[in-house]
Image (cartoon, helix red, strand yellow):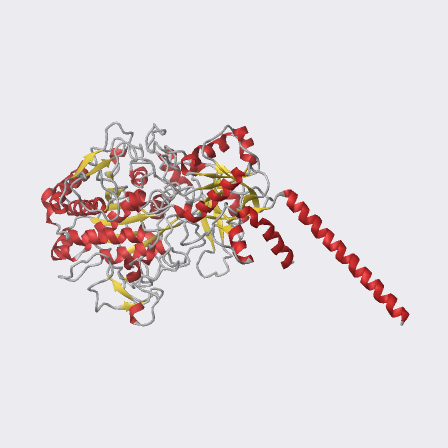
């Protein structure tokens, strides 16, 4: 068989000339490598596959036809679009990004074309002029009547398509290889030995999410949000329990704590995004730039520069500041909705937080802010003479501008004072009065929905503001677009300036001095340290090459995914009995990084301990050491943060006086039966529940989308480019093989016959 395979390979050698590399091929293995090109997939690789997701009404995403595995077809590169009936049959189409959207939309509108397409391969660049997201994303969640308002005017809606064929995103090397192969096929006019693409993209789930969850062919999308309080919630009283049914939070948890009557300023940011290719989505501008600004603001407020005044200020604070990094928001505002439902149902994850109209003093969401300075972009570019000032916009709910006047005043006062610190003008202006209200993609809108009065009047809700770098529509064309919303688009100092504005505004609001410029100016800021933190966080959360292999992450935790960072919320396999257990099998590296950062950022620091940026626990020598999975590792009111998988004291965490919590983020229509974290065989089952139905109806929530991701076999997804013989050559090889086999049998029979005759003679 090896001889036959080698002969087949050698028959193809002539077809390779001019089609692939010009390197000398001297062995059969080298020839195989030239003929077969697999697409590297998985963590650390730029290639990705579009996979099937399911919701309450059906499916989106991509899947190979049932029973047609593997799917394969001839490589054809498109440089212009054609009429649906002009495309060749049985082809896998290689497209530049500029044509991808219109071709997929053609397939959506022409079922006959979609049935003839075997697959689509997208080249990685250059970036197109459209967004993969919808023009009016999450329109059904809008708190206003004009639900078709185009916040994302460049949106093509690719993320909502259901495609009956595989679609892959190629990396640079595979794309170049595919282009050469397709060019050869074009020269051959699709005749003779041709280059093909073989794809595996079997998706086991079908129908809708409730059906596949019942059949166990899918798992729900979900994860955990992270919430932290500054100052920390008071410790519990009594027997040392956390007041939420769990043991002392030293078990890595969220700080066993009680509650008090202090209202809170909620500072929100989202941390995940969406895209046609989930694992390739970065979301640098939206939402990660806002997340980084919030994380840096938390560090400013908890830093030692403020500590000289921190003792005074925190004693004078009339309002607590709560930071919330919310996960799952692209999927029906899943993170904020679940957070609010957990509060309404008295869940342990938010015990001590008073999320009621009287307990929430204001909501400030930090949205996309990485492009707030015209003419500036890139992680390393600092304030330059040719770049304009930092221009920010404050969005409010319809009818909620008056209520938000105090928050806007605090932001504007902080911006005025910040300008002298950062060396350029910083402005905060009200968003256009022509806008219908808050973008429906905002988490702040969830708070308004739940906390407004029974009449649905936003003016009766706590003041809510979205701070962003856009006015009437999202900037650019990269919203929820895989690969293209990356670190090269954002400006580090725009984010740093926003961090200081948010910190000083939150500080003023916590003191109860709405719009008071003097109070905002009193908060000391080491802007060099803020810049260092922002730059470092950008490398951790936007640089796909480094990811959580960055110094900040390495100082606080041990990633289990070799530093790979996914900005896709992913699936939630199970839950832990105590939601605060930092189980790396349940909580992602991303979520654990955010938890550790906020723990270090918001804990009290000793006087004179200058913040150097990074939340790495500097200056915490002498604190009690701990292991996070030990439920009694720290005293009540403390958390065990900063532990690493290193033997000895260096790997131990530190007991910090902080309140930081994991809050589950998954559909309110689900409960997990037997999800107690003790069942290692995954015998739990996600089930539908109507426990939140009355609450959802009361607050006018649209139907829950109930997002899930299909299961797939172990060898899926997979893509291989290869050279396939001409069918005539295959028949000739088959005939030759049969002839050789027949001749061999005949020769064997003749030899046997001759041998027997010889034996008879003897």
Given residues 26 and 319, the one toward you in this image is 26
Question: What residue is at 70 percent from the left and 52 percent from the top?
Answer: 737
Residue at the right extreme, as displayed: 761
Asked whether residue 641 is in view, the answer is no
Given residues 3 and 39, the one toward you in this image is 3
Indicate left or right for 83 with 492 as reference.
right
Question: What residue is at 65 percent from the left and 43 percent from the top?
Answer: 728
Quadrant where the image shows the N terminus: bottom right
Indicate left or right for 360 with 86 as reference.
left
Indicate left or right for 310 with 152 as reference.
left
Indicate left or right for 159 with 477 as reference.
right
User: Residue 409 sits in which quadrant?
Assistant: top left
* Residue 34 screen position, x and y as percent: 51, 52
* Residue 380 screen position, x and y as percent: 24, 49
* Residue 620 screen position, x and y as percent: 21, 65
Given residues 151 and 746, the one toward you in this image is 746
Quadrant where the image shows the C terminus: bottom right
User: Residue 249 sits in which quadrant?
Assistant: bottom left
User: Residue 650 sits in which quadrant?
Assistant: bottom left
């Amino acid at each position: 068989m090896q001889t036959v395979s080698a002969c087949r390979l050698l028959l193809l050698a002539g077809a390779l000339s001019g089609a692939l590399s010009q390197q000398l091929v001297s062995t059969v293995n080298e020839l195989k490598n030239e003929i077969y090109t697999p697409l590297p997939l998985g963590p650390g690789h730029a290639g990705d596959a579009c996979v099937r997701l399911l919701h309450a009404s059906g499916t989106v995403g991509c899947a190979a036809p049932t029973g047609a595995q593997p799917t394969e077809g001839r490589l054809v590169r498109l440089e212009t679009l054609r009429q649906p009936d002009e495309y060749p049959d049985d082809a896998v189409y290689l497209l530049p990004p500029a044509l991808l959207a219109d071709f997929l939309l053609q397939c959506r509108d022409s079922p006959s074309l979609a049935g003839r397409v075997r697959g689509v391969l997208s080249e990685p660049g250059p970036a197109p002029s459209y967004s993969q997201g919808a023009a009016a994303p999450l329109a059904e969640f809008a708190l206003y009547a004009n639900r078709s308002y185009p916040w994302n005017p460049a949106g093509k809606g690719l993320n909502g398509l259901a495609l009956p064929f595989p679609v892959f995103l190629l990396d640079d090397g595979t794309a170049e290889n595919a282009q050469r192969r397709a060019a050869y096929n074009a020269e051959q006019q699709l005749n003779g030995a041709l280059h093909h693409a073989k794809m595996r993209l079997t998706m086991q789930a079908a129908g809708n999410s409730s059906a596949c969850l019942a059949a166990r062919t899918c798992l729900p999308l979900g994860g955990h949000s992270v919430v932290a309080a500054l100052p920390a919630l008071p410790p519990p009283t009594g027997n040392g329990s956390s007041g939420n049914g769990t043991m002392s939070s030293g078990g890595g948890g969220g700080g066993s704590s009680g509650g008090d009557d202090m209202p809170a300023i909620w500072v929100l940011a989202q941390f995940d995004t969406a895209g046609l290719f989930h694992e390739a989505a970065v979301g640098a501008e939206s939402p990660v730039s806002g997340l980084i600004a919030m994380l840096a603001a938390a560090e400013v407020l908890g830093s030692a520069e403020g500590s000289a005044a921190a003792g005074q200020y925190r004693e004078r604070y009339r309002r607590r500041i709560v930071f919330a990094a919310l996960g799952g928001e692209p999927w029906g505002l899943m993170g904020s909705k679940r957070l609010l439902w957990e509060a309404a149902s008295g869940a342990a994850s938010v015990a001590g937080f008073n999320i009621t109209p009287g307990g929430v003093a204001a909501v400030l969401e930090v949205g996309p802010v990485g492009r707030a300075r015209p003419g500036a972009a890139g992680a390393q570019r600092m304030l330059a003479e040719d770049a304009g000032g930092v221009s920010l916009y404050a969005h409010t709910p319809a009818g909620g501008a008056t209520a938000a006047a105090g928050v806007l005043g605090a932001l504007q006062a902080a911006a005025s004072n910040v300008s002298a610190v950062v060396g350029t003008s910083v402005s905060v202006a009200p968003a256009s009065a022509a806008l219908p209200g808050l973008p429906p993609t905002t988490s702040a809108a969830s708070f308004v929905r739940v906390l407004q009065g029974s009449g649905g009047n936003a003016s009766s809700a706590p003041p809510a503001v979205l701070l962003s770098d856009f006015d009437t529509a999202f900037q650019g064309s990269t919203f929820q677009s895989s690969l293209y919303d990356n670190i090269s688009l954002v400006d580090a100092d725009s984010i740093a300036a926003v961090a200081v504005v948010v910190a000083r505004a939150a500080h003023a609001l916590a003191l109860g001095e709405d719009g008071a410029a003097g109070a905002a100016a009193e908060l000391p800021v080491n802007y060099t340290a803020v810049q260092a933190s922002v730059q470092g966080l950008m490398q951790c959360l936007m640089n796909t090459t480094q990811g959580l292999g960055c110094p900040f992450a390495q100082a606080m935790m041990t990633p289990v995914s070799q530093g790979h960072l996914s900005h896709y919320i992913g699936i939630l396999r199970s839950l832990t009995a105590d939601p605060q257990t930092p189980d790396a099998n349940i909580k992602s590296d991303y979520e654990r990084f955010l938890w550790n950062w906020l723990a270090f950022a918001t804990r009290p620091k000793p006087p004179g301990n200058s913040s150097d940026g990074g939340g790495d626990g500097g200056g915490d020598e002498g604190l009690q050491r701990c292991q996070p999975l030990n439920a009694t590792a720290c005293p009540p009111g403390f958390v065990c943060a900063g532990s690493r998988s290193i033997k000895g004291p260096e790997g131990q965490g530190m007991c910090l006086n902080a309140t930081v919590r994991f809050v589950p983020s998954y559909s309110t229509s689900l409960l997990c039966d037997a999800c107690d974290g003790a069942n290692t065989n995954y015998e739990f089952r996600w089930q539908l529940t109507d426990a939140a139905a009355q609450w959802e109806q009361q607050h006018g929530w649209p139907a829950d989308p109930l997002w899930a991701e299909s299961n797939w076999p172990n060898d899926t997804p997979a893509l291989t480019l290869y050279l396939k013989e001409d069918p005539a050559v295959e028949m000739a090889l088959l005939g030759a093989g049969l002839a050789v086999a027949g001749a061999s049998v005949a020769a064997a029979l003749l030899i046997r016959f001759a041998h027997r005759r010889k034996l008879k003679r003897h």
